[in-house]
Amino acid sequence: MIEFEDVHKHFGALHVLQGIDLRVAEREVVVIIGPSGSGKSTLIRTVNRMEPIDSGSLVVNGTQVNAKTVDVNRLRRDVGMVFQSFNLFPHLTAAENVMLAPRRVRGLSEKAARERAMELLTKVGIPEKADVHPARLSGGQQQRIAIARALAMDPKIMLFDEPTSALDAEMIREVLDVMRDLAKEGMTMLVVTHEVGFAREASDRVVFMDAGRIIEDSPTAEFFAGAKEERARQFLGKVIKH
Amino acid sequence: MGIIFEFPDLYLFPSGLWVTIQLSVVSLIGSLVIGTVIALFRISPIPPLRWVGTGYVELFRNTPLLVQLFFLFFGAPLLGIRFSDEPLEFNFRAALLGLSLYHAAYVAEVVRGGLLAVDKGQIEAARSLGLSYLGMLRYVQLPQSFRAVVPPLANIFIALVKNTSLATTIGVVELLKAGELIESRTFRTVEAFGSVAVLYLLLTIPMGIGVNWLEKRLRVAR
């Protein structure tokens, strides 16, 4: 479903992705962990071409993401993305946030889009907030609506870029619960997170990144039983202590 | 009503005021449309469009409005452009065009600032949903910039109303011209131009009040 082959990416002089090889199969949940600045976010942002790659090959849903002929808007319809800072549209209500893409990209009628939005808001547990603007919602509620918004285009893949890093402890749980449900339903997910608990329970594989490289890529159980790489073990030790 | 029988020329005030209102409203809309397009050019990912946008703003903002009006009025016919065959209509259209083009440069800068003030995450979120660049502009970036641009736009539009008085120099019988005509026929200089000033205030002060009201409403909306 997602295939990286020797992918490189620079930000100016900074070599942020240094030869990434990674495969994510359909219905697989892969968690990417690693210290900040290791290139995790950049990595998942290449999947929907929010960041173009410099060299190598990246195939998503059978499409070479960086081919010149690729219709990037079409590609993105199949790849939902959830951001650390939610990025809900403040001028729209919760339901309107969810309805925007189905209406304006897919051309759904307002009624059909509204019905679908209500389904999704129910799924993430806050249908009663449908007509509320984001500014009046908690961070956890905002992030759940952001997930509903990303799901509204019926994506085949969901990308999560540190979805709980901007949240208070009590709100992290409600967001992770939604993500766990999604994983159970068989959504293909690529998740950058520091939530080791989520990785342990909900993921199939854990990828450890450091300095632009994938240092370790192991099935979840094996990874937590004892990471092969010293750096991954050290990092895990630090994260779990907290 | 005696005053009207004494000075039958007073009808010039309402008709001049009406011309000033027409000039103001139409060039306000014109400058808003042109200015927004130029602002979009200025932030466009396509370099030639950015150059056109920058060139436009620099040209129209850095030359006097009066020069631009004279250029349109005296120069356009020589370049083969006839706004109208009817002289008064010609003057009026030249003024409309000049006022719109000039204020559009200022509108463009304000709208550009508003667009750039929208958080980058908003743009990314919209694009990640599969919205095209133009769709993102229309449904996310432009609506969100609206609140930030209302007060500075109001300043531009108040200036525009006052600047319509320059149209008097190219033969448009607007409010100031009406005052001049009345003054020349009655020799009541203080009253004539005093009235003109008051009538401008009647246009501009409600605009300021309207903007304050709009600003408050926009603040409540979020």
Image (cartoon, coloured by chain):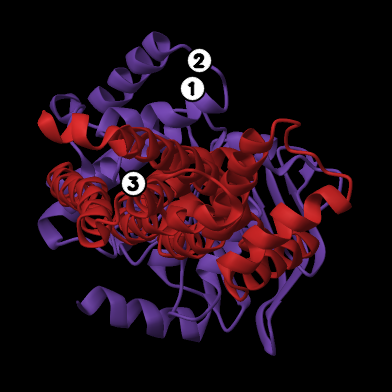
Residue kind at label 1, given as amino acid type: Arg
**Pointer 1: residues within 10 angstroms few (<14), some, or many (20+)?**
some
Q: How many C-alpha atoms fall within 10 Å of the one at disc 3: few (<14), some, or many (≥20)?
A: many
Real-space CA distance between mark 1 and mark 2, rounded to the nearest whole angstrom: 5 Å
Query: Which residue is denoted by mark 1 in the rendering?
Result: A103
Q: Which residue bears the numbered disc 3?
A: A88
Residue situated in front as seen by the camera: A2 or A113: A113
What's the CA distance linking mark 2 and mark 3?
20 Å
Figure colour of chain B: red
Which residue is identified by label 2?
Answer: A108
Hey, which quadrant is residue B217 in on the image?
A: top left
The picture places residue B182, in percent across and down from the top left corner, at: 34, 47
Does mark 2 fall on the same chain as mark 1?
yes
Q: How many marks?
A: 3
Q: Earlier in the sequence, mark 1 or mark 3?
A: 3
Tell me the shade of chain A.
Answer: purple
Residue B101 vs residue A115: left or right? right
Q: Earlier in the sequence, mark 1 or mark 2?
A: 1
